[in-house]
Image (tube, rainbow, N blue to C red):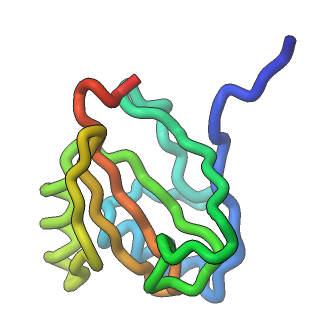
Amino acid sequence: MAKVLGLGGVFFKAKDPAALTAWYQRVLGFPASDYGVMFPHPEVGFTLWSPFKADTTYFEPSTNPYMINFLVDDIDGVIAAAAEQGVEPTGRQDESYGRFAWFVDPEGAKVEIWQPLEEASG
């Protein structure tokens, strides 16, 4: 039987796509092109598709009805690079399955970064 293998992309509207892309390049180091950013399939971690209840507060302080999660290899390095651009995380948290931090992008979307622990990588 044919099946879905994972997340193929995240597509969304933006008020200023070029400025938003530039922010992600500066703050999170995205290797952007004219088509967006193509990430190779990671050797660690996984892609999670997870609907939340309509009244969740997990996406706060954003009022957008979505949150984007990015897998990272060095959460402290990503946070330090963001700080060099004047962007501080809105929170940090360590769990048994990985380390997390959150930012809000210029369009108001909550962005979660996740560094999985070895045992959580597959």
Counting from the top left corner in percent of width and height, residue 69 is at 46, 56
Which x, y percent locates residue 38?
54, 45
Quarter-wise, where is residue 35 in the image? bottom right
Q: Quadrant of the N terminus?
A: top right
Q: Is residue 51 left or right of residue 96?
A: right
Label count reads 0
Residue at point 28% right, 63% down? 101
- Side (left or right) of 87 relative to 52: left
Quadrant housing the C terminus: top left
Residue 45, position in %: x, y?
39, 33
Q: Is residue 21 found left or right of 89 in the rendered image? A: right
Q: Nearer the viewer, residue 77 or 55?
A: 55
Residue 85, relative to residue 82: is it above or below? Answer: below
Q: Examine the rendered structure and indicate whether residue 15 appears above or below residue 35.
A: below
Question: Residue at left 57%, top 86%?
Answer: 63
Looking at the image, which is closer to me, 109 or 31? 109
Q: In x, y percent, where is residue 97?
A: 30, 39
Q: At 39% across and 58% down in the image, what residue appears?
A: 30
